[in-house]
Image (spheres, helix red, strand yellow):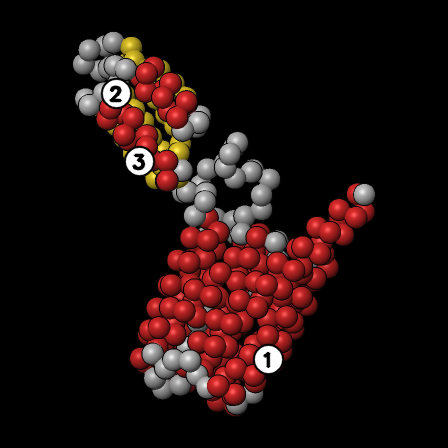
Amino acid sequence: MNEYNRMKGTLIKFMMITFGALVYAMGISIFLDPNNLAPGGTTGIAIIINSITGLKTGTLVFLINIPILIFGWWKFGIKFILSTMYVTVASSFFMNLMNEYIILKYGVITHDLLLSGAAGGSLMAMGMAVVFRQGATTGGTDIIIRALRQRYKHIRSGTIFIITDAIIVSASAVILKNVEIALYAAITIVISNYVLDLVLYGGDSAKLLYIISSRQEQIAKRILDEIDIGITYLKAEGAYTESEKKVIMCVCRKYNYTKVREIVKEEDIDAFFIVSGANEVFGDGYKSYLSEEI
């Protein structure tokens, strides 16, 4: 039974990875590649070379990734790189397939650069999110940045992505001799990063609440009963009154925040209510400490 469950889990994982690679390839082949929008990374490099040579973008993505995959094999081992290698092969295959049977047969869906960038960037991000959730990457600069993050942990992945993408977009403006397309490619990157962050981490972000009230017990009870989220009492002392107080501290999902606010309003209209954003939350009901940072 354990062997069966393991095989079933592996099959589901690769089915999800295949689906992610398909969605990722759709964004590139249907929207970005036909309009010469180079969204950074190895894909952006492949689109630039395609516009010059006419070689298929999918084939170019695969060829560019070969030395990077070899480096990843050496750096992270075969277990990690196998799934990434599969994503690279699958996405390259899907790119060429869609180029041949959709673009060449039916033509480009839209030449509107903003619409193409928004649709293509969003599809790319959603495909990447599915792949990342399965512990793989789409190859290319993802592997290089992962290696840099291991050595220089103080550098955020987003910063490195921005620098590399900016270099590739600038190169596309020079090589393609079209600043307008490069600017739309930059917009594509912004949209893609936003959607990726939303899909990957949107569920992790939350509201951090501090509630100071003379009716803290009634408020706490209602929050526990009606919303079922954890509450911590912090011991505090008023500087002016020098009286001891209990401060309610809790973290809630964004969709629960309005309900908490209504409870506080109904129980104590004079309550002191502090709200701030919590970008990441670890612990019961949220993200596990054991989950690997993407």
Image vertical order of residue 122 relative to residue 228, above or below? below
Q: How dense is the environment of label 3, judged by Cα within 10 Å: few (below 14), some, or many (20 and up)?
A: few
> Where does residue 99 sit, x and y in percent of width and height?
54, 82
Q: Is residue 174 above or below residue 84?
A: below
For disc 3, the marked residue is: 258
Q: Earlier in the sequence, mark 2 or mark 3?
A: 3
In primary-sequence order, the first of circles 1 and 2 is: 1
Q: Residues within 10 Å of mark 2 (few under 14, many from 20)?
A: some
Residue 97: mark = 1
Callout 1–callout 2 Cβ contact below 8 Å = no
Q: Which residue is mark 2?
A: 267
* Count of numbered labels shown in the rendering: 3
Mark identifier at residue 282:
none
Q: Which quarter of the picture shows residue 190? A: bottom left
| 6 vs 281, nearest the viewer | 6
User: In which quarter of the view is residue 268 placed?
Assistant: top left
Residue 64 visible to the viewer: no
- The amino acid marked with disc number 1 is Leu
Residue at 41 percent across and 42 percent down: it is: 205
Name the one closer to the observer, 38 or 105.
105
Q: Quadrant of residue 273?
A: top left
The x, y position of residue 212, in whole percent, is: 27, 21
Q: Left or right of 43: which side holds 277?
A: left
Residue type, numbered disc 3: Thr
Q: For the point 59% across and 63% down, which residue is it?
A: 19
Q: Is residue 81 left or right of residue 41?
A: right
Q: Is residue 256 visible?
A: yes
* Tag 2 near tag 3, CB within 8 Å: no
**Circle 1 SS class:** helix
In percent of width and height, residue 63 lies at 62, 78
Measured Cα–Cα span from mark 1 to mark 3: 47 Å
